[in-house]
Amino acid sequence: MKTQGRRDFIKTLAAFGVSGVGISASFPTQVEAVTESIPSENLMGVLVDTTACIGCRKCEWACKRAHQMESGSIRDYNDRTVFQKPRRLDHNSLTIVNQYPDDESKPSINVKIQCMHCDYPACVSACIVGALSKKKSGAVVWDGNKCIGCRYCMVACPFQIPAFDYHKAIEPEIRKCDFCVARTSQGKLPACVSICPVEALAYGPRSELTRIARDRIKKHPDRYNSRIFGETEVGGTSWLYLSAVEFKQLGFPRLDKDPAPIISETIQHGVFKYFIPPVGLYVLLGGVMWITRDKDERRD
Ligand code: SF4
Ligand code: SF4
Ligand code: SF4
């Protein structure tokens, strides 16, 4: 299966003679829960080319709309003052675009962030009630019917992605990108990919995305840093990034290749097997937080 930006996707629809849905043969049709991590080499992913992103923030707007969140008018997203300092995700933002000055003599670099949909998701392993799961489509999704609001997933995530909706104390809600499973299971593109006007986002099988990324790096060594972020970090992620500069300069954490869940799984099993009392659990979670944090922060 080839990767698809917005224009390619429309062409595919035309080829299948449909206008919005019904191309299920070319996209994953089922979102099936699995208990174990699934290396996503042949699952779907997104390649984010930060050298192409123009920082229009249309993806932020489309994401909110697709998730029935308060989105306001698309014109509101022309506000450039938000780029004054890097923002973090919150209960009303499943994705945001930050801007980093690379070098004062060069143009700024725009970086869209969201859940990376890890191949070995630490959040899934840390969740003691199975409220988070990696699906066969590549998406890591949250199940509100199972969540007890413990927020261990927030502690375990090496990218500090899950946000907690504190406005819903009675019904705890963890908010994070769900890879638009409702759309992709109907053969549609994720909302952010669909709206991106410059095709800075490409959706497709991860193996194809890594091939494209390597190809771009090879053809344009002057334009790209030779690394693909997400290819190996914490065991690999479904979302991959290309950049002109070192990823550290764009706010990406420096992470090992080893999957983080090994530690959180040990904790989870310990809780049930040996019935670790709560105080012991918090000590262990502190350990997970330390291990999954950025390598440089740890050294500090
Ligand atoms: S980025 Fe964080 S929230 Fe997303 S799958 Fe990985 S561990 Fe889970
Ligand atoms: S894939 Fe969907 S949920 Fe994730 S950032 Fe894009 S629009 Fe938002
Ligand atoms: S819609 Fe595309 S170009 Fe605009 S900010 Fe998002 S990723 Fe960048």
Image: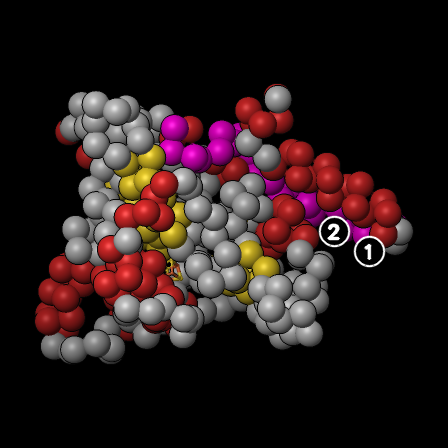
Residue at (35, 26) in percent of width and height: 246
Q: Is residue 56 left or right of residue 127?
A: left
Q: Is residue 73 above or below residue 247?
A: below
Residue that mark 2 sits on: 268
Q: Secondary structure at mark 2?
A: helix
Q: Where is residue 111, by image quadrant?
A: top left
Callout 1–callout 2 Cβ contact below 8 Å: yes
Residue 102, x across and y down, in percent: 30, 28
Residue at (49, 68) in percent of width and height: 32
Distance from disc 1 to disc 2, alpha carbons, whole Å, reads 7 Å
Residue 118, x across and y down, in percent: 49, 48
Foreground residue among 124 and 169 = 169
Residue at (47, 48) in percent of width and height: 88
Q: Where is residue 59, by image quadrant?
A: bottom left
Q: Amino acid at mark 1?
A: Phe
Q: Is mark 2 within 8 Å of ligand 1?
A: no
Foreground residue among 116 and 62 = 62
Q: Secondary structure at mark 1?
A: helix
Q: Amino acid at mark 2?
A: Gln
The quarter in which the C terminus is drawn is top right
Residue most toward the front? Answer: 81
Q: Is residue 252 left or right of residue 2?
A: right
Find out whether residue 272 is within the magenta segment. yes
> Magenta residues, as a range?
249-274
Q: Report how many numbered discs are placed on residues in the image.
A: 2
Residue 126, x across and y down, in percent: 67, 51
Which label was assigned to residue 38? none
Which label was assigned to residue 272? 1
Q: Is the stretch drawn in magenta largely helix, strand or loop?
A: helix
